[in-house]
C-alpha cells in the first residue's frame, strides 16, 4: 500500500531544487595508487574536477554537495577554489561506507520535495543526457538508476572455485551512476536502514527497494560512463576523453547583434557562410584571407589583423579559423613545399589565432572556434599530414581549454562531416547530389557553439 501511495504522489511531484551529491570519500584501495583515484590527474585535470565540471554545467542542477574523506578535505577545498565551482554549496565529511556518506548528504538537505542525484566521483564521463533522464525519472517515478545491458555472461559461484549458477543474461543489467531520488523517499529509506541496523546494501537503490518505498526506473546508461577502479582504467578513460564529441547546441542567434566576430578564411567555403550568417544576425564581421592580404600562415599579419579590429571596434567577441589547404599523396612522394604549406596554414594558422586572439577575448569572455575533421580519429593513407594535423587541432583545443579556463575564454573544435566546399570539390570532384553537408548548416552550428558555454569540446556537425 505504501508503495502505491508514494507512486501516485510521484505523478504530481514538482521538484523545488535539484541537488547533485558527488561521493568522493573512497580510499581507492583497488586502484593501488599513492593517492585516492578521484585526485589522480586525467586529461589535464583531476578525475574529481572532470566529474564536477559535468554537474556544474548542467542546467537542471541547482546545487552540488561534495562528500569527501576528512584526510582530503583541505585538498578538495583547494581544487574548488582553483576552479571556481559556483554550484558547490557544501563540502561534507563522509563515513566508513557508501551508505554513511550518502546519509551525511541527506541530513544536510532540509526539503522533502527536492530531487537528489547521487554520483560516484570516479565516473567522470557521465553525460548531460544521463543526468537529465535521471532527474526526470525521479520526478515521475520516485527513484531512478542508470544501467546498461550486460554484454558478458555472468557466472555465479558460491565458493569461488566452481560455477553454481549461470543466470540468463537477457534479464541482467550492469548498474552505473547517477542514481536519483525524491528527497523524501531517500531520506525515509536511510532512516529505516539506521533504525534497523541493516548493513548489506551496496547502493542507495538497494535501500529503497528493500523497504518497498518506490519503484526504481531504469535510465539508459552509456558504455563510456566507466567507473575508474584500476590503474588500467585511466588509460581507457583518457582515450574516451580524447575521442569524446558533443552535438551542436541551439542558442538564440539574435544574440549576435552588435557582437564583433573575426573570421580567418572567410572568403569562401565554410568561412564565407559564417561571415554571411553572422551578418544576417546583426554581428559586426571582419573577414580575412589571402584575398585581402592576410595570410594565416604569417604570424605578424594575423596579429596585425586582430590589433586593427580591436583598435577600431574596441572589442573582439569571437574568432573563427577556417583557413585550410588539402594536399594529398603518399608522404614519401610529397614535396617539402606542399607539406610545409599544409602545416603552416592548417596548424600554425590555428596556433597564431589562439596566441594573438586570447588577449582580446579575455576582456570580453569570448570564444574561439577551430576546425578539425573526422580524419583526426585515425590517420588515413594519402592524407598523412592532413589527418595528423587535424588530430593536433583536437589536442590543441583540449589543452588550451584548460589553460584558458581561468580567463573565461572558451575554445572548441568544429568537426563537420563531408561538406560541400570549393576545397572538397577541388580534391574529390563531383560527388552525388545531396550526399554532402551544406556549409550554411556548419556555419549556423558554429555560431551556436560560439555563444554557448561549451569549451574544450569536439562538436560533430552532421547532415542529418
Image (tube, rainbow, N blue to C red):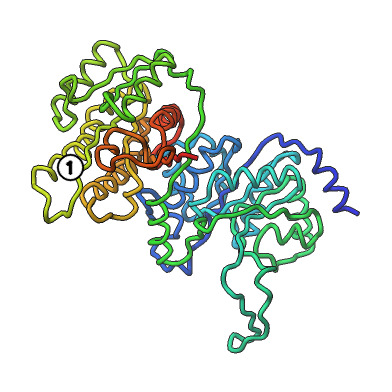
Query: Residue 288, position in %: x, y?
Result: 23, 22
Residue 60 falls in image quadrant: top right
Q: Local crowd at mark 1 within 10 Å, few (<14), some, or many (≥20)? A: some
Tell me if 34 is positioned left or right of 343 in this view.
Answer: right
Q: Residue at x 63, y 41 (%)?
A: 19
Q: Nearer the viewer, residue 185 or 136?
A: 136
Q: How many marks?
A: 1
Can you identify the residue that label 1 sits on? 343
Residue 149's x, y, as percent?
61, 63
Against 385, residue 294 (above or below) is: above
Q: Nearer the viewer, residue 331 or 222?
A: 331
x, y percent for residue 122: 50, 56
Q: Is residue 401 above or below residue 30?
A: above
Is 296 above or below relative to 338?
Answer: above
Furthest residue toward left: 336
Residue in the picture at 22% in, 36% down: 351
Amino acid at each position: 500500500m505504501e508503495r502505491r501511495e508514494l507512486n501516485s504522489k510521484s505523478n504530481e511531484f514538482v521538484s523545488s531544487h535539484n541537488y547533485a551529491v558527488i561521493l568522493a570519500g573512497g580510499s581507492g584501495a583497488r586502484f593501488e595508487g599513492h593517492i585516492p583515484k578521484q585526485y589522480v590527474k586525467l586529461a589535464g585535470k583531476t578525475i574529481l574536477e572532470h566529474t564536477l565540471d559535468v554537474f556544474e554545467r548542467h542546467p537542471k542542477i541547482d546545487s552540488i554537495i561534495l562528500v569527501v574523506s576528512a584526510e582530503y578535505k583541505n585538498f578538495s577545498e583547494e581544487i574548488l577554489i582553483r576552479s571556481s565551482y559556483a554550484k558547490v554549496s557544501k563540502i561534507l565529511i563522509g563515513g566508513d561506507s557508501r551508505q554513511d556518506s550518502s546519509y551525511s548528504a541527506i541530513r544536510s538537505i532540509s526539503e522533502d520535495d527536492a530531487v537528489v542525484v547521487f554520483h560516484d566521483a570516479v565516473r567522470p564521463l557521465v553525460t548531460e543526457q544521463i543526468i537529465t533522464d535521471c532527474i526526470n525519472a525521479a520526478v515521475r517515478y520516485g527513484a531512478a538508476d542508470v544501467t546498461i545491458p550486460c554484454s558478458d555472461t555472468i557466472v555465479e559461484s558460491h565458493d569461488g572455485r566452481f560455477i553454481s549458477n549461470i543466470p540468463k543474461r537477457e534479464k541482467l543489467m550492469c548498474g552505473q551512476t547517477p542514481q536519483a531520488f525524491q528527497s523524501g523517499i531517500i531520506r525515509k529509506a536511510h532512516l529505516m536502514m539506521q533504525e534497523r541496523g541493516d548493513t548489506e546494501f551496496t547502493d542507495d537503490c538497494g535501500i529503497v527497494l528493500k523497504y518497498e518505498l518506490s519503484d526504481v526506473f531504469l535510465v539508459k546508461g552509456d558504455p563510456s560512463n566507466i567507473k575508474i577502479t584500476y590503474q588500467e582504467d585511466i588509460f581507457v578513460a583518457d582515450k574516451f576523453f580524447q575521442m569524446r564529441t558533443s552535438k551542436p547546441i541551439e542558442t538564440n542567434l539574435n544574440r549576435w547583434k552588435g557582437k564583433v566576430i573575426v573570421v580567418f578564411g572567410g572568403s569562401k567555403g565554410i568561412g564565407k557562410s559564417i561571415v554571411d550568417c553572422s551578418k544576417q544576425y546583426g554581428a559586426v564581421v571582419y573577414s580575412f584571407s589571402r584575398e585581402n592580404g592576410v595570410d594565416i600562415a604569417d604570424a605578424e599579419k594575423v596579429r596585425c589583423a586582430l590589433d586593427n579590429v580591436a583598435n577600431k571596434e574596441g572589442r573582439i567577441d569571437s574568432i573563427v579559423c577556417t583557413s585550410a589547404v588539402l594536399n594529398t599523396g603518399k608522404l614519401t612522394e610529397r614535396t617539402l613545399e606542399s607539406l610545409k604549406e599544409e602545416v603552416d596554414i592548417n596548424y600554425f594558422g590555428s596556433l597564431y589565432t589562439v596566441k594573438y586572439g586570447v588577449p582580446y577575448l579575455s576582456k570580453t569572455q569570448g570564444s574561439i572556434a577551430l576546425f578539425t575533421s573526422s580524419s583526426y580519429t585515425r590517420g588515413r593513407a594519402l592524407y598523412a599530414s592532413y589527418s595528423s594535423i587535424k588530430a593536433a587541432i583536437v589536442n590543441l583545443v583540449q589543452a588550451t581549454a584548460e589553460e584558458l579556463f581561468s580567463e573565461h575564454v572558451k575554445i572548441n573544435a568544429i568537426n563537420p562531416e563531408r561538406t560541400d566546399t570549393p576545397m572538397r570539390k577541388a580534391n574529390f570532384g563531383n560527388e552525388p547530389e545531396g550526399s554532402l553537408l551544406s556549409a550554411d548548416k556548419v556555419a549556423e552550428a558554429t555560431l551556436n557553439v560560439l555563444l554557448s558555454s561549451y569549451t574544450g569540446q569536439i562538436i560533430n556537425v552532421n547532415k542529418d
